[in-house]
Image (spheres, rainbow, N blue to C red):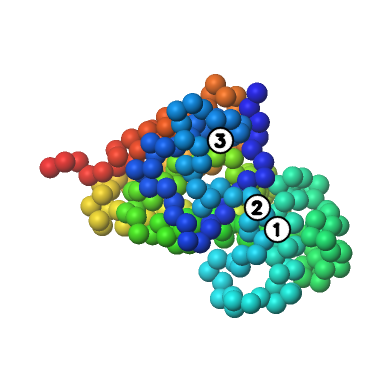
């Protein structure tokens, strides 16, 4: 039986690169990644820590893109602990069942520490979503990993190769879709992230067109939507616990992604 991946999240680890397309021959079977099994003849661990890391790996990292001093104050660190705790509470219980007291306990603090920063549960949950979403935006992951030296098609292909990995950060996104139905603040936060995400993918596609690696006749909006729909759809299916027999191997998935990316190249003259 397939199991839902837990305790993993996308975390950008500075100084480590995203895997290049040439690394794909050493990629592990996706089912061995999800279920902790190895497969004969396949090298495990080919997907580096830049794509997969425990959520705890975020604990001492400042917000990406923030103008944060090297030494953060105790208040800053406490705030991050609360945001991380709120994100975990949100993933495990959703918005309605999440409790401020539970968030405080996870962080080893009191509810007063939460309310001193955010007046309502909605406020702390939105802040936690912003905290996680900022880290999973393509530009943040690419910049921090050094993958900005790759060409746009290779960057998109590399990001696509990780879509079937269990990912707690994308589980936050799944929960956000459900909670956004009845919470205007979460809906606005989610929509802001989705628009930023789509724009950053679109920017990469346009860069590819300018570089001559993407057919300029293809709609940027359409290509961006395909990328986003693939990412969200894959996460929904994997997080739901799709049976092994319906999951491709890592190599099978990468081959399809590579084929789709290759199909966007300009026609040969």
| Residue 118 horizontal side relative to residue 189, left or right | right
Q: Secondary structure at mark 2?
A: helix
Q: Camera-side residue: 55 or 63?
A: 55
Place residue 114 in its image quadrant. bottom right
Work out how far the residue at label 3 is from the one at label 1, CA to CA, in angstroms: 25 Å
Residue at image point 19% right, 41% down: 267
- Quadrant in which the C terminus is drawn: top left
Check contact, mark 3 vs mark 1: CB within 8 A: no
Check contact, mark 2 vs mark 1: CB within 8 A: yes
The label number, if any, that marks residue 55 in the structure image: 2
Q: Secondary structure at mark 3?
A: helix
* 193 shown above or below 267: below
Q: Camera-side residue: 221 or 28?
A: 28
The label number, if any, that marks residue 21 in the structure image: none
Q: Earlier in the sequence, mark 3 or mark 1?
A: 3
| Residue 192 horizontal side relative to residue 91, left or right | left
Q: Earlier in the sequence, mark 2 or mark 3?
A: 3
The percent position of residue 69, horizontal first and vertical second, equals 59, 78
Work out how far the residue at label 2 is from the one at label 1, CA to CA, in angstroms: 8 Å
> In the rendered image, which residue does mark 3 sit on?
33
> In the rendered image, which residue does mark 1 sit on?
84
The percent position of residue 255, horizontal first and vertical second, equals 37, 33
Residue at image point 63% right, 56% down: 57
């Amino acid at each position: 039986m397939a199991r839902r991946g837990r305790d993993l999240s996308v975390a950008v680890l500075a100084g480590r690169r995203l895997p290049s397309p040439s690394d794909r021959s050493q990629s592990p079977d996706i089912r061995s990644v999800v279920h902790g099994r190895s497969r004969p003849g396949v090298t495990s661990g080919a997907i580096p820590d830049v794509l997969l890391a425990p959520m705890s790996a975020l604990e001492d990292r400042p917000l990406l893109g923030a103008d944060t001093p090297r030494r953060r104050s105790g208040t800053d660190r406490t705030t991050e602990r609360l945001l991380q705790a709120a994100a975990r509470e949100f993933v495990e219980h959703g918005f309605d069942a999440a409790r401020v007291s539970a968030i405080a306990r996870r962080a080893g603090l009191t509810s007063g520490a939460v309310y001193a920063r955010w007046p309502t549960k909605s406020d702390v949950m939105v802040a936690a979503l912003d905290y996680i979403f900022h880290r999973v935006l393509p530009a943040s992951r690419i910049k921090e990993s050094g993958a900005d030296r790759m060409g746009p098609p290779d960057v998109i292909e590399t990001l696509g190769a990780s879509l079937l990995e269990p990912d707690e950060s994308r589980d936050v996104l799944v929960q956000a879709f459900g909670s956004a139905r009845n919470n205007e603040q979460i809906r606005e936060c989610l929509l802001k992230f989705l628009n930023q995400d789509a724009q950053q993918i679109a920017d990469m596609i346009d860069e590819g067109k300018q570089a001559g690696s993407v057919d300029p006749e293809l709609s940027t909006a359409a290509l961006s939507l395909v990328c986003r729909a693939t990412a969200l759809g894959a996460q929904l299916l994997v997080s739901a616990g799709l049976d092994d027999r319906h999951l491709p191997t890592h190599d099978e998935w990468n081959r399809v992604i590579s084929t789709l990316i290759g199909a966007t190249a300009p026609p040969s003259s």
